[in-house]
Amino acid sequence: MADESDFETRVVHAGAEPDELTGAISPPIYQTSTFAQDGIGRPRGGWEYARTGNPTRSRLERAVAELEGAAHGIAFASGSATTATIGELALPGDEVIVGDDVYGGTYRWFDKVARPRGVDARYVNLSQDPAAALRAALTGRTRMVLFETPSNPLLRLVDIGAVVAAVAGHRGSGGRRPLVVVDNTFASPVLQRPLEMGADIVYHSATKYLGGHSDTIAGVAVTNDEEAAERLRFLQNANGAVPGPQDCFLVLRGLRTLALRMQRHGENAAAVARFLASREDIAEVRYPGLADGPHAHPQAALAARQMSGSGGGMIGFIPGPRGGRSARERAIAVCELTRIFALAESLGGVESLIELPAVMTHASVADSPLAVPDAFVRLSVGIESAADLIADLRQALDRA
């Protein structure tokens, strides 16, 4: 698809061009582990072994790279495998600066896997004044700065351009400028394209919005940095944490409706956030698209500038105590009383989900500086009727 096409057109066609052999509009799934070769050292079309490369996976890698404006895409078996492989760009003795509000699995990998290997992760608040925070945090050992925006689960934003500017003149590990790595899972390339703001590597848990249907596990990293791409490809093959062709196909299928879905996610989330903000029994609402009122997001202006004017589909809130119940007790009750919102981990699917991060997705950060408030509820707002979603939350809150 030509580069000058609108994003809404490219998202339908990227990686989903008709099959070269038959013209099939839905590209085939190459469910194979190996490929016949034309002779010794003469693989047909460059295909040798499916861990190293698979045509279905190649389409997915090319599609996400195109949507993010990247030259290279590298797919992995999960979002966590993507995080771990990017983390392996840091060597023993190196230091990684990590945003202090990240997915629990990201903290777990850096703290329990990377740290024993000699890679130090330092958790820094990059959401308020990233320039000042990085001036204090960057050292001669810094290999990369890795963060989420919006963050999981507290929905903090990080000014990507400010981070890029802050590291521009710094010489870290090996005398090189630290890599700026952005987890774009919560926004998707529909709302935010960090490479255009100067980031070096962008990655997704493709399980979430890219796939969009809660039926697959996958991850994708993209970059324009040739050296980083070469190393990530090597690690992809050497470690073998690759997605199967069926998973790649499911994400490719999900991508074709991504723009439409993200529009509906954002519209529904904005309506739900306004409803929550209107209730007196809600102590706090966190939604990047909420720009006014007592629960306005402190970075709403940044969200409007950096996220294509949408707050996305994720909301966080803390209920206030009521009727002898504490905020935590009410939070648990709400999670267990919803009928449309399913009590489940994950996010980004067409269906709405509710969870309590402190004991679910972020249990691994309990008793750490990254611990999540125990009454904080996370919503992944789906594409159902906004009126039905609000009615569901209303009855759960009224009963909690």
Image: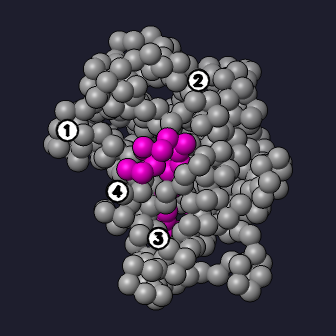
**Could one spot residue 267 in this view of the protein?**
yes
* Residue 6 among those drawn in magenta: no
The amino acid type, in three-letter code, at marker 4 is Leu
Q: Which mark is residue 53?
A: 3
Examine the rendering and report whether any part of residue 394 can be seen: no
Figure check: 218 above or below 305: below
Number of labelled discs? Answer: 4
Q: CA distance from mark 3 to mark 1?
A: 29 Å
Q: Earlier in the sequence, mark 2 or mark 4?
A: 2
Q: Which residues are magenta?
A: 212-231
- Quarter of the picture containing the C terminus is top right
Cα distance between the residues tagged 2 and 1: 28 Å
Q: Which mark is residue 353?
A: none
Q: Quadrant of residue 385?
A: bottom right
Vertical arrangement, residue 211 with respect to residue 327, above or below: below
Q: Position of residue 40 (x, y in %)?
A: 38, 84
Cα distance between the residues tagged 2 and 4: 28 Å
Instruction: Give the residue displayed 71% in from the left and 60% down from the top.
Output: 14
Q: On the image, numbered disc 1 is attached to which residue? A: 92
Q: Residue at x 66, y 38 (%)?
A: 192
**Sequence-earlier tag: 4 or 1:** 1
Mark 2 and mark 1 lie on one chain; the one further toward the N terminus is 1
Say left or right for 89 vs 181.
Answer: left
Q: Which mark is residue 235?
A: 4
Vertical side of 337 occupied by 40: above or below: below
Residue 269 horizontal/vertical position (percent): 71, 43
Q: Is residue 266 above or below residue 251?
A: above
Residue at label 2?
161
* Amino acid on which the number 1 mark rests in the picture: Pro
Question: Mark 2: few, some, or many residues within 10 Å (few <14, many ≥20)?
Answer: some
* Mark 2 vs 3: CB contact within 8 A: no
Q: CA distance from mark 2 to mark 3?
A: 34 Å
